[in-house]
Amino acid sequence: MTEHTAGHLPSGPGAHTTQIEPTQRPGGSNILKGSDSITDKIREHFDVLDAGREQAYVLSRQVVRVSSQSIKSAHRRQFEDARSQLQEAADLTAQMLAALEDCLELRYGGFVADAQKEYAEAAITLAGITDGELPSPEGLGVDYPAWLNGLAEAAGEFRRHCLDSIREDNIERAETVLGLMDDIYHLVMGFDYPNAISMGLRGRSDACRGFVERTRGDVTNALRQRRLEEKITTLEDLMGSRE
C-alpha cells in the first residue's frame, strides 16, 4: 500500500471525489468535523448542474442552427419552410429550458440567452417580412432581455430585406422596411440599463443605429436614381413628340 505524506493528495481517476478526514489537532477543535455531509450535498448538486448543462447546451446549439435556417427561408420567401423551422426552434427552446428546471444558476445568461435571442430574432424577422403580428416574449417563451436583443439584431435582417426590395425596384417596400428599422432603433435605445440587466443591449442598439443610417443612404440613392430615370424618360418622350 502506498502511503501519502501530509499535504499531498493522491492523483489519478476519482481523485476529486476522495474524502479526507480532518486532522484533530491537540488542544483545539476542528470546524471541518462533519463536513462530509455538507460536501456530499454540494457534490450532488453540482452533478445535477453538470448533467443539466450538458443536455441544455446541445439543445441550445440546435436552436441557433434551426433559427438561422428559418431566417434564410424567410428571405427566400419560402414562408412555409420558415414557419416549420420556427416551430422546431420553439420546441427545442422549450426542451432546453425544461432541462434547466433544477439548474436555476444556469437559467440566465450564457448559451441559454444566446439561443433565446436567436429564436426571438427568427420569429421577429419572419413577422416583419410577412407583415405579421409582432410576437411577444411571453408568446415565444423567452426572457425579456433575449427578446429585446433579438429585436435589435432583427434590424440587420430587415436591412437585407430592404436591399432585396431595392434590387427588385420596389422602392415603396424599401421605404416601409426602413421605417420599421427606425422604429426598432428608437424602441431599443429607450432601454438604457446596465449590461447585467439588458445583457448587451446597448452595444446592439449602437449596431442597430448603424444599420438604419446605412440603409437610409441606400434608399435615398435609390429614390434619386428612380427620379432621374423618370425625368430622362419624360424628356425622351417630349423630344420624341417633337420629331
Image (cartoon, rainbow, N blue to C red):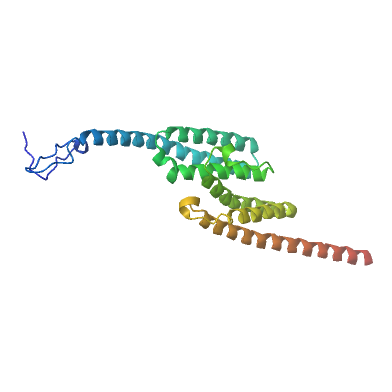
Residue 84: x and y in percent read 59, 33
Residue 21: x and y in percent read 14, 36
Residue at x-position 8% and y-position 42%: 25
Quadrant where the C terminus is found in the figure: bottom right
Residue at x-position 50% and y-position 39%: 63
Of the pair 213 and 201, the residue shown nearer to us: 201
Residue at x-position 54% and y-position 35%: 90
Quadrant where the N terminus is found in the figure: top left
Of the pair 165 and 156, the residue shown nearer to us: 156
Of the pair 127 and 107, the residue shown nearer to us: 107
Drawn side of residue 241 relative to residue 46, left or right:
right
| Residue 13 visible here | no
Q: How many discs mark residues in the rendered view?
A: 0
Res. 225 image quadrant: bottom right
Looking at the image, residue 7 lies above or below residue 215? above
Drawn side of residue 40 relative to residue 134, left or right:
left
Drawn side of residue 36 relative to residue 180, left or right:
left
Drawn side of residue 153 relative to residue 37, left or right:
right
Looking at the image, residue 178 lies above or below residue 87? below
Residue 107: x and y in percent read 43, 40
| Residue 223 visible here | yes
Res. 136 image quadrant: top right
Residue at x-position 39% and y-position 36%: 103
Residue 80: x and y in percent read 64, 35
